[in-house]
Amino acid sequence: MTVLTASRLPLPLFRKGKVREVYEVDDTRLLLVASDRVSAFDVVMAEAVPMKGAVLTQLSAFWFGALGHLGPNHFLTADVDEILRELPALASHRDEMAGRSMLVRRTKPISFECVVRGYLAGSAWKEYRASGTLAGEALPPGLVESARFDVPIFSPATKAESGHDENISAALVAAALGTERADQLRRRSLALFRAGQVHAERHGIIIADTKFEFGLDQDDKLILIDEVMTPDSSRFWPADRYRPGSTQPSFDKQPLRDYLAGLRTRGEWNGNAPPPPLPTEVVAATSARYLQAYRLLTGVSLPEVF
């Protein structure tokens, strides 16, 4: 499978993110293409991670299918042959699109990340350690890093095109969107997380936290969009290695973060662009983590040719 740093399809470019190009198909559909770009510490690396875009796309497709009973989503197909039957003008770009393209319904995105946390980690642990709170709201005293919450916590955040998202209170979401819509987001996010958590734990993975994105269709109906419970949008931990009280190993870009953190500690990189070159072993290890997560969650290996 070709490693892709950026797609260049003959369609109007709707948006370009850290990983994806989003193209306009028509008034009702978009085409998402996930590249193999990878970022860490908010800097996009020069090297791409083989198969990463395919993992993000095909794992999202798996979850859209598995969780469809919990409410509508924007997914139409991630089968490149089906996409090309709909869009035959893109036939010459099949290799560029295969495995990493998703045709979706167009919605009006809601401008908040719907984060659900099952465990105390990341920015939540950092805030709790400093003040005993999450987004300014008190959590029980005496928790340790990576502690499991008795009940998953809905913890929304602002969306950021660059830099870090910011944790905010549910009250701020209600003030912006109205109480009914905010409650709908909370209930839907928690239901999706619980279902994903149960499935993942059966397959040896803890989903410590994840973020969902939603949009509204033409009838103002809430639609799950973007990616769903991937290594980019979630913390996946191996269940058999879980030990509360410290940072956990994870199925994502941990090899990359560890390498870069070492450079920063030694003063060999200041954390800003341009990024340092990555050793081939770090790239390979990162790719292997993504593929392992896909295999464990779906029960099959991701094919290298689509």
Image: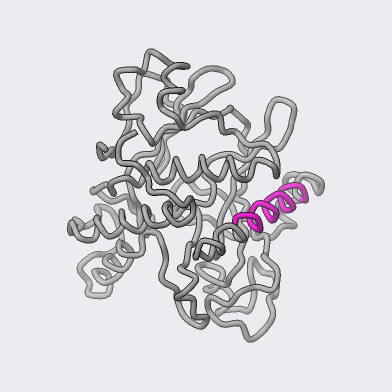
Q: Is residue 108 above or below residue 235?
A: above
| Residue drawn at x 65%, y 51% as measured from the top left | 192
Residue 26 is situated, as x and y percent measured from the top left of the image, at 53, 17
Viewer-nearest residue: 198 or 227: 198
| Residue drawn at x 48%, y 50% as measured from the top left | 298
| 69 sits left or right of 79 in the view | right
Q: How is the image coloured?
A: one colour
- As drawn, which residue projects farthest toward the front? 299
| Residue drawn at x 48%, y 62% as measured from the top left | 236
Residue 109 is situated, as x and y percent measured from the top left of the image, at 61, 37
Q: Main secondary structure of the magenta part?
A: helix
Q: How many marks?
A: 0
Q: Is residue 134 above or below residue 44?
A: below
Residue 247 is situated, as x and y percent measured from the top left of the image, at 45, 76
| Residue drawn at x 67%, y 60% as measured from the top left | 154
Q: Is residue 43 magenta?
A: no
Residue 221 is situated, as x and y percent measured from the top left of the image, at 73, 33
The stretch of residues the image draws in magenta is: 183-196
| 101 sits left or right of 168 in the view | left
Q: Quadrant of the C terminus?
A: top left
- As drawn, which residue projects farthest toward the right? 180
Q: Quadrant of the N terminus?
A: top left
Residue 195 position by quadrant: bottom right
Q: Is residue 195 magenta?
A: yes
| 50 sits left or right of 156 in the view | left
- As drawn, which residue projects farthest toward the top? 89
